[in-house]
Amino acid sequence: MELVREGAVHRAAYIDPAVFALEQERIFRRAWLYVGHESEVRAPGDFVRRRLGPEEVILVRTETGALAVLHNRCAHRGALVASEASGRVRQLRCPYHAWTYRLDGALLGMPLPEDYAEAPAQGLARVPRVDSYRGFIFASHAAEGPGLAAFLGGLASALDNMADRAPAGTLTRFGGSLQLEYRGNWKMFMENAVDLVHPGFVHRSSVEAARAHPEALGADGLAQQGAQMFLANGMPAREWREVPLHAFAGGHVYMGGFYRAGVIAPQREDPAFREYREALVGRHGEEKAAAVLAVDRFNNLVWPNLSVNARFGALRVVKPLAADRTVVEVHCFRFDGAPPEWEALTLQFVNLAASPASLVASDDLEIFERCQRGLESAAQDWIDIRRGAGTDRPEPDGSVRGAGSSELAIRQQFEAWRRYMAP
Amino acid sequence: MIAASLERWHEVQQFLFREARLLDERRFAQWLALFDPDAEYWVPYAWQQQSPKDHVSLYYETVKLLGMRVDRLARELSPLDTPPARVNHYLSNVTVEEGEGELVARAYLLFVEYRRAEQRWFAGRSTWRLRPAAGDFRIAAKRVDLLNADQESGHLRFAVPF
């Protein structure tokens, strides 16, 4: 059954477990998926446990300094080999019968090898393709397909911009990670992140709370940043319409920035920002530093499941667990060489915008769950995604620009979905 | 720090029970008024987290930020809090130590929340720094360490503070 047609998508795309299973095979076993950052696995033996689409994996730096993504499943009885979230090891060792593996997954040994007529040779299964772009490591369960740069396409610019914002030239993961769960379909997060009509409604409670407390704008840094973030969501609809959307092949899309004032503004005149700008000029020269800082975008989505906020040093990885269950994992990055204020800005951004206790994201997640419930209704099968189609402006490179009020991003994501889901 | 007298322990415990009741009864403005203006409210994300400034937190808020948080709940406009969650804060194992001009109170917390079709609960350890003030106390800092703060499967959203 066709689930996507011109301007509409069938509700089964969100609620049907069979569709979810097919998505896992055709999208999450085909696309490049973000798995980690070079700074998390600097030295041989450094590893992090991750979920890569439907699979538990281990991202590890091998003895030769290469990157490997291994299935976290002992070749013997199937136990998780790594149970810690991260660490540094000399070899990987299963806790069950002590089968041991080299860092590239090759089987090193097991107890009582003489009990086998023929020695087992199977090591930890490897995810066939691993590559990194500007320090961001991606892997693909598909042995063949477009390379990482081709996959990223127009959204490589988001990773470029984040990396370019580090005066020392490198980013470093810091501050742990947040995991928030919702009982809704994974696509809702990716769609809502670039739906610019909802904030005025869904986030009205925090907008009004901030408006009622103008003194917060002159208070401590946490309250200031919070108030500025909440107030920004209260832009009138006609101003949201002016926030640009730019969508690319593959379902990738970014939205322009909408933070204008105070500590969250893209350009500032305070001493900390001047110091930061000088450090950036020291690295890139005047012209490029100005260009890097001039990039004012908010959510950059690498479809199917990565959201990049370059300016605030935050990544969100969307992990589909079932048709109606998703976990979003949030990672923070330090812009190496930036003044210490930047770390605080990032942590506070993440606490305020992406924590399970966020005054903003929590309302989005609640709405996703209501959509999930509502879409159970058989009264109406098709979901309309035509808003703003008349404002789409195709570019010569095949990308499409549109008004912030448009559902362009959702249409583009479903175009990619349709292509991936084809047999 | 020395263990507080029985009388002091009783006073502090009554204060903590009052704080819990204000949250449970959604008397948010009165709850906020228990905090000193420079107080911080912190629910770490990592177990035994050392600082809110080098690691993400579930909550890390000043009184002014908390003010917006509870104002938002009081408005009853938030999809998250519609219908409002009903919560109980159960405190036990209360200990009180006295220091120079401040007290440290510790308690085990059981936080039970009911909303719509679901009841869920969280266990934690709460720590308050309290300042005696005119026969009463003011909260200088409150920290709540949830046993499962960093649970691998993530958290559904939170509304009423711990």
Image: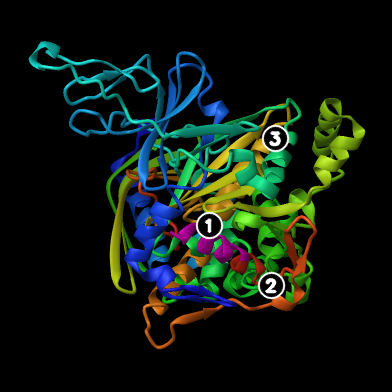
Q: Residues within 10 Å of mark 1 (few under 14, many from 20)?
A: many
Residue at disc 1, secondary structure: loop
Q: Same chain for the residues at labels 2 and 1, yes or no?
A: yes
Q: Residues within 10 Å of mark 2 (few under 14, many from 20)?
A: many
Whichever of callouts 2 and 3 sits on the residue coming sooner in the sequence is: 3
Q: CA distance from mark 2 to mark 1?
A: 26 Å
Q: Are marks 2 and 1 in contact (CB under 8 Å)?
A: no
> Circle 2 is placed at which residue position?
A406
Question: What segment is highlighted magenta in the picture?
Answer: A412-423
Which residue is at 38% across, 31% downward? A126
Q: Amino acid at mark 1?
A: Ser
Q: Amino acid at mark 3?
A: Ala
Quarter holding residue A389: bottom right
Asked if residue A221 can be seen in this view, the reply is no
Can you tell which mark lies on residue A358?
1
Question: What is the residue that sits farthest to the bottom in this orientation?
Answer: A379
Where is residue A119? Give x, y as percent: 18, 16
Q: Are marks 2 and 3 in contact (CB under 8 Å)?
A: no
Residue at disc 3, secondary structure: helix
Which is more foreground, mark 2 or mark 3? 2
A71 up-or-down from B43: above or below: above
Which residue is at 32% across, 43% downward? B147
Q: Tag 2, which chain?
A: A
Q: Tag 3, which chain?
A: A
> Circle 3 is placed at which residue position?
A163
